Amino acid sequence: MAVYTDINKNELDSFLALYNIEEIVKFTGIKEGVENSNFLLEGNGAKYILTIFEKRTNENDLPFFFNLMNHLNDNEIKCPQVIKDKSNKLYNFIKDKPAVITSFLNGISIKKIAPKHCGELGENLAKFHLASNKLEIKRDNTLGIKDLNKLVIEINRINLKEYANLISIINNEYDYLKDEIPFNLPSGIIHADLFPDNVFFIEDQLSGIIDFYFACNDYYAYELAICINAWCFERNNEFNVSKAKSFLHKYNSIRKISADELKALPTLARAAALRFLLTRLYDKIHHNKNDLVSTKDPKEYYEKLKFHQTVKNVSEYGL
């Protein structure tokens, strides 16, 4: 979460007049994240999240995200519920930008991840995949490996000297992966951005998943690869096989991972590492220092990519 678009109380009150929610007595910008603008809205009893969608989010995709979230709620998957307005609309506009109110989830993101947290994630992610499979809506992954070419071209066009070595590595890895990504794996709706800051816990129990605004249709195994990258490395970027084993075994206990998915996992892990290396580098290059937002180090994903390049068999991930 982040803040790019600032709002004042009058603008907020005009927007809230469209909704049947209690009076909001306090609103606060949320700094964490790199995408849309987010605010915590607090009433005398209830709390909500207001999200204002920025330029990277296509308005045409919003019904997909919102219907997915409400479907998951209906199927007892722990995620925010979209609050409809008085006219039953899913979203409205602030400063000519689409904006939505969602329910507030209790819990906090885990800073010190242990294998038990990875197991909780695996179990709940498998339930998410099974539940979302019942929903007949579709959105292409605009940041899948076949679509990363646009970012590769843009980064090469800018060609900053301080990132020259990293850009060369990106070019070589993309050239390799674009011909190696497997096809015909089990697929459906995935979250596609399931980082620790998008998962809440109360004590050691998963209490909610947030930030569905990259959700799309893709391989389920690609989601597993994203999570291995995001959850199963230490702060020094060393791989922790105990975390990966807990994550994959718990997932597999709910939704069986096929032999083809297992075979593809090392390649998909490389693709996931490249995806976040690219987007983090792009965001860092285009960062506006005046924004109330934090950027993340792209080199973290270069270190993770180097590990995945050495993996010869899925057993190295704990299965």
Image (tube, helix red, strand yellow):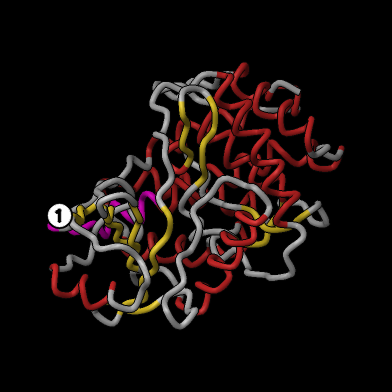
For the residue pair 131 and 235, the one nearer the viewer reads as: 131
* Image side of residue 259 versus residue 71, left or right: right
Please provide the residue range marked out in magenta: 280-290
Is residue 286 located in the magenta-colored stretch of the structure? yes
Q: Tell me the residue at 50%/36% (across/down).
A: 230
316 up-or-down from 69: above or below: above
Is residue 78 located in the magenta-colored stretch of the structure? no
Residue 216 locus on image (x, y percent): 61, 62
Sort mark 1 into few (<14), some (14-19) or many (20+) by Cα contacts within 10 Å. few
Q: Tell me the residue at 77%/51% (across/down).
A: 182
Q: Tell me the residue at 42%/79% (across/down).
A: 86
For the residue pair 36 and 160, the one nearer the viewer reads as: 36
SS for tag 1? loop
The total number of labels drawn is 1
Residue 57 locus on image (x, y percent): 43, 69
* Residue type marked 1: Lys
Q: Tell me the residue at 34%/51% (across/down).
A: 46
Q: Which quadrant would the C terminus be assigned to in this image?
A: top right
Residue 87 locus on image (x, y percent): 45, 83
For the residue pair 35 and 212, the one nearer the viewer reads as: 212
163 up-or-down from 252: above or below: below
| Residue for badge 1 | 289
* Image side of residue 99 versus residue 177, left or right: left
Residue extending farthest right? 259
* Image side of residue 257 versus residue 294, left or right: right
Residue 127 locus on image (x, y percent): 71, 43
25 up-or-down from 163: above or below: below
